[in-house]
Structure formats: C-alpha cells, structure tokens
Image: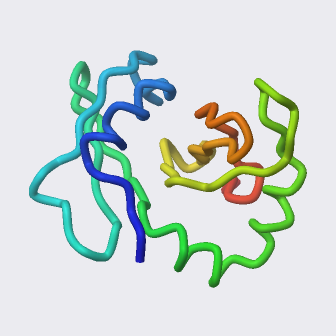
Amino acid sequence: MTMMAVKDIEARLTQAKCAICKKSRFGIDSRSVKEDGDWKAICIDCHYTFPVYADMEFYLQTQPDVKYRLRDIACPNCMKRDHSLNFRIVMSVRESIYFLTCNSCQHQFTEQSSLESFE
C-alpha cells in the first residue's frame, strides 16, 4: 500500500476550503495517523475536523464506479486524462474532494466528487 506522507497531504489540503469558516489552513491530527490511511484533519482556524482517506488502492478496489468517473476528469493544465488519485477528503456530508496529480505534466489539482453526495 503506497500512501503520501502526512506533511505532503497537509500541504495539499490548502487547495480545499473549510466547510465552516471557508479558510484553507489545515493540519493532520497526529493522534489519528495509523497504518490504515484513515486519518483526521483539523481546520486550524475553527477546529472543524473531517476525515482524510490516504489508502487509494483499497478505495479504488472497493469502489469500481470511481475509476470510470476519474476517466472523465481532464487535467486543467494539459487537458490529458491520465492522472493518479493521491487521496480524498470528505469535507462535509455533501462535499467530497479528490486530490489528483497529472501523470503527464505533474500538475496537482482537486476535483469535487459527485459520487459521494448524501442527501
């Protein structure tokens, strides 16, 4: 199982906005870091917590629809559809965000997930 380092995920989290205060300063709660890749992030400004899922290999194996959804996403930099899913967060019950890296140009970007909206 290949996962990103905690410090790398913390750096990428600045691409998201907090569901409560709309700021982009987050940290990973060190008490939650375990081998399974299910961690907790916290907004530094308002202390809102949300899950971070770093084990994308397991996620892609158990959620076959995600692979098809990822094929539709183009890199905003080079417009190619060849990318890696690095990790995902569930910011709120209606907002799940994928963090991707383009395999062609190495551009890092996010994509709102339409598959995990709960109503």
Residue drawn at (43%, 60%), measured in percent from left and top? 53
Instruction: Write down the quadrant of residue 63 in the picture.
Output: bottom right
Quarter holding the N terminus? bottom left
The coloring applied to the image is: rainbow
> Which residue lies most toward the front here?
104
Left or right: 75, with 110 as reference point: right
| Residue at the outermost left position | 31
Q: Position of residue 54 (x, y in %)?
A: 42, 61
Residue at the spot 69% in from the left edge and 40% down from the top edge? 112
Most extreme residue toward the bottom is 62
Q: What residue sits 29% from the left and 44% below the top?
A: 41
From the viewer's side, name the closer residue of 11 and 26: 11
Above or below 15: residue 62: below
**In the displayed structure, does residue 6 sit left or right of residue 90?**
left
**Vertical order, 31 against 41 (above or below):** below
Image vertical order of residue 79 relative to residue 9, above or below: above
Q: Which one is in front, 93 or 58?
A: 58
Q: Position of residue 30 (x, y in %)?
A: 12, 52
Residue in front for this viewpoint, 105 or 22: 105
Q: Position of residue 47 (x, y in %)?
A: 22, 31
Q: Quadrant of the C terminus?
A: bottom right
Q: How many marks?
A: 0
Residue at the spot 33% in from the left edge and 41% down from the top edge: 8
Taking 52 as reference, is 112 above or below it?
A: above
Q: Is residue 97 left or right of residue 12?
A: right
Residue 91 appears at what percent x and percent y?
48, 42
Q: Is residue 1 left or right of residue 111?
A: left
